[in-house]
Image (cartoon, grey):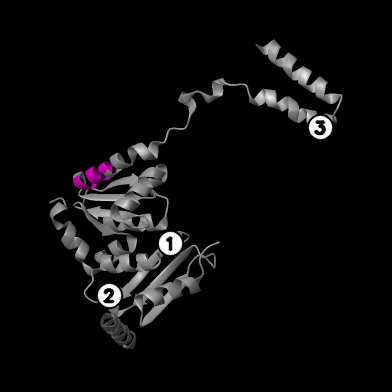
Amino acid sequence: MGVTKEQVESSLKAKLNPSHLEVVDTSGGCGASFVVEIVSEQFEGKRLLERHRMVNAALEEEMKQIHALSIKKTVTPEQWKQQQESNQSNAAA
Amino acid sequence: MATSLSSILFKGISARSFTTPLTSSCYYGMRYFTTVSNDPDTHNDFKPANKLENSNISLADVIEQDVKDNPVMVYMKGVPDFPQCGFSSLAVRVLQQYDVPLSARNILEDPELKSAVKAFSNWPTFPQIFIKGEFVGGSDIILNMHQTGELKEKLKDIMSKK
């Protein structure tokens, strides 16, 4: 009785209003561990620790049942764009 | 004492067994067993002690002292030489890239410490890393800081000079 990927997604969407969101259940569908990647304007001007705290807070209820949460990315739309572009140029090179 | 008790018990059973089926007389007899007081097993010394209630304050003190005394303090699952979780292992491996003294506590050994650390940092997961008394974050953050060079900057003044 874990948490579904959809539950994690809807909580994050509701609280952080992300422009890009990726949630992966890394426990093979058990709902015990997730990897998340979030792009949100709300991260603007926040340190990494604060951004992670925002994600933890958004998932406060879910965290009671989630065993492991890996927050891979918490970036602003600006940073996201830059990263996408540098990835593309790397791939092209 | 024992003889008088058993005689009461047997009287109870025999008195009842004439009027009621035997099954209900069992219940009747049981009453005498449960009323035996001052059972040696109930001595106060054997009662579970509520450690959490009395020690929560002092646990926060322990953590405060830990992070003050140790420039790099990690609360983790397992110990640095034998981490018992991939994330704790990752954090230790990142920190071991730097020539800094590493102090750690195994929260798997102490559930009370585990909840005290969570409350202290207001952070839900482990590992938790403190550098120079400041809460830095978990394994994702330490890895990110390692990649951006921020960690090197932070650890610069505690790296042993060779």
Q: Main secondary structure of the magenta part?
A: helix
Quadrant housing residue B139: bottom left
Residue under circle 2?
A43
Magenta stretch? Answer: B61-68
Label 3: state its secondary structure. helix
Residue under circle 1?
A63
Amino acid on which disc 3 is placed: Thr
Q: Chain of mark 3?
A: B
Amino acid on which disc 2 is placed: Phe
Residues at marks 1 and 2, common chain? yes
Quadrant housing residue A36: bottom left
Up-down relation of residue A9 to residue B65 (above or below)? below
Residue B92 visible from this viewpoint: no
Amino acid on which disc 1 is placed: Met
Going by the image, does A66 lie left or right of B102?
right
Going by the image, does B88 lie left or right of B37?
left
Residue under circle 3?
B23
Near mark 3 (Cα within 10 A), the count class, few <14, some 14-19 or many ≥20, is few
